[in-house]
Image (tube, rainbow, N blue to C red):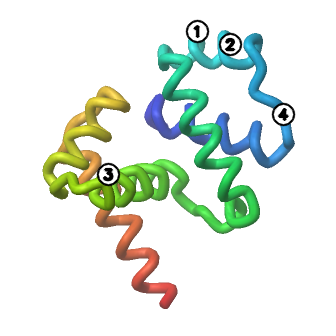
Amino acid sequence: MSDNKLFLEELKYLVENEVSLNEYVIDQLEERFEKNPYLITQLYQILADNKKILPFFNDIEATIYDYIVSEEMANEKTYYGATKYVADMFDTTQTYIKCKVNQSRYALQKIS
């Protein structure tokens, strides 16, 4: 399992169990996953805002990448720019982000 997926699963667990994101928790996540506090807070907020549907996310990593790419595109970024932005956020490749976004969108199409 990739570090990003493990990190997102940990955040999902915290939100589902209503663990508040205090300074201690942020410090622990920052130290364990080498993520900056702003990113941790931002992702926690995204998950908290969508808490009711969290149990239905099979691949939290793909879902979060897709969500952020969609948000960035709504803010007038191109698909290329949005996937590049997410890749930089998570210190991974743009190709990996594109694959995960496609995986997420395929799963949604399959459901509907």
Depth check, front residue: 44 or 4: 44
Question: Residue at position x 31%, y 40% from top?
Answer: 86
Query: Looking at the picture, how far across and down is residue 8, in whole percent?
Result: 56, 39
Looking at the image, residue 51 sits to the left or right of residue 80; the answer is right
Q: Which sits in the foreground, 62 or 26?
A: 26
What is the distance, in whole Å, between disc 2 and disc 4 at their CAs? Answer: 13 Å
> Mark 1 vs mark 4: which is more N-terminal?
4
Amino acid on which disc 3 is placed:
Glu
Tag 4 residue: 19
Q: CA distance from mark 1 to mark 3?
A: 28 Å
State how far apart marks 2 and 3 are (Cα): 28 Å
Q: Position of residue 16 (x, y in %)?
A: 79, 48
| Residue carrying label 1 | 31
Residue, disc 3? 72
- In this rendering, the answer to whether 73 lies above or below 45 is below
Q: Amino acid at mark 2?
A: Gln
Q: Tell me, yes or no, whether the two marked residues, 1 and 2, touch with CB atoms within 8 Å.
A: yes
Give the secondary structure at mark 3: helix
Q: Secondary structure at mark 4?
A: loop
Q: Secondary structure at mark 2?
A: helix
Query: Is residue 7 positioned above or below 58 on the image?
Result: above
